[in-house]
Amino acid sequence: MKTKILFIGPTPPPYSGPELSMQQFLESETLNETFDIKFLKTNFRSDNTKKGKLDVSMLTNFFIFFSKLLRLLIANNIHCVYYPITPTQIGWIGRDVWTILLSKLFGAKVIIHLRGSHFKLNFQQFNGLIKKLIGFSLKRVDCAIVQAKYLKDQFSPYIDPSKVSVLYQAMDVNQYSDTYDVEVQRGKILIMGHMTKAKGYTDILKIIPDLCHDFPYIKFYFAGNIRRGERGVFYNQYTGEKIDYEDPFEAESNILNSVYKDNYENLGIISGDDKMKHLQSTDIFLTASYSEGFSRSLLEAMAIGKPAVFTPVGAHREVYENGVHGFSFIPGELENLKEALRKLLASPDKRKEIGAENRRNVVSNFSIEKIAYDFKTIISKTLDS
């Protein structure tokens, strides 16, 4: 009989990195051939702007979630629970702590997965009593997964480094192919993700005037949703400095009321064929995030063969090389951001060269088949420990 694994996490919608990654694992032939996978969905909201919002629906779903978890643990002899944790205090006290402890109570091995890179920084600001409770639960974890080697200290001193594994982002290299009929739009710069300060949205808007002075034909396309406040990312993961909040709605209003309004377009949330067409038609892909685990949208663009400008946060600093896979800049350093974009805009040959290298790199190192095999190895090792 196959070993029973309970996967707990979100699935689309919304069509963000965590949701899409969980869906990939649930559909993986490699994992399903090896394990008997059960699944408990965690997300009850299809709108990213409402994630982490404490309201009546969250409280109601707290009880619904744990009643379902309890039934699954009682009705099935679950050997292992896989659970992506949150980086926020409300997420830990609202679900993460109790999911870990309840799973351990029923004798299951517990694998947690940090899909970002800012738990350790956030944890320092948590309430003292809550920190003790989180530490108590972390000490009972059998394996922790992070998205980059240098993030292996995120759970120190509660989880021994020998119990921390690295699992990179995965990509369906057949779905995200570099063979397509869509024409590339010269000067199109695509950004995908939440339109917030932490994702670099307000920084990008600031550099539009200078870049459009030198390259009047360029246009920035933003795919995502604008939301006030930050939920989970409060620090520059590269420097450790606190992020100074900026209102994204005010920043957008400024650009829409300027002479550069035609160089800007807010696409809203895109998915499916619409998302694919924008990825295929873009000239350059840009991510200016202050913190990441491993950007899925960046990997999607690279799989399609696009050159990129990115910040060396999360796994980016160890899997991408500046000048080879694109050009990197430190989060918040606007002059370096402008210079990185200028290098690509000024050289069609360089864009083509980097795009081809990015496609090759994704196929070789980040295919869903390879990452699913790595994940299977992590689960098997945990079960044997």
Image (cartoon, helix red, strand yellow):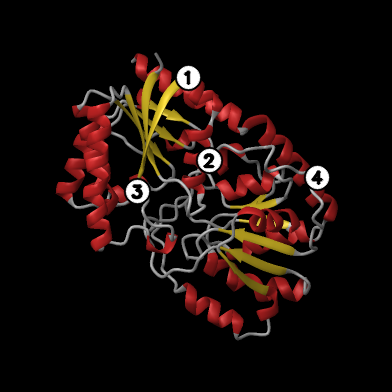
- Residue extending furthest front? 75
Sequence order check: which comes first, mark 4 or mark 2?
A: 2
Amino acid at dot 3: Pro
Quadrant for the C terminus in the image = top left
Residue that numbered label 4 is attached to: 353
Sequence order check: which comes first, mark 2 or mark 3?
A: 3
In the foreground, 259 or 377:
377
> Please, what secondary structure does the residue beneath circle 1 have?
helix
Q: CA distance from mark 1 to mark 2?
A: 28 Å
The tag on residue 87 is: 3
Sequence order check: which comes first, mark 3 or mark 4?
A: 3
Mark 1 or 2: the one toward you? 1
Q: CA distance from mark 3 to mark 4?
A: 37 Å
Q: Is residue 353 left or right of residue 174?
A: right
Kindly check if marks 4 and 1 are in contact, taking CB atoms under 8 A apart as contact.
no
Label 1 environment density (alpha carbons within 10 Å; few <14, some 14–19, many ≥20): some
Amino acid at dot 2: Ala
Q: CA distance from mark 4 to mark 1?
A: 39 Å
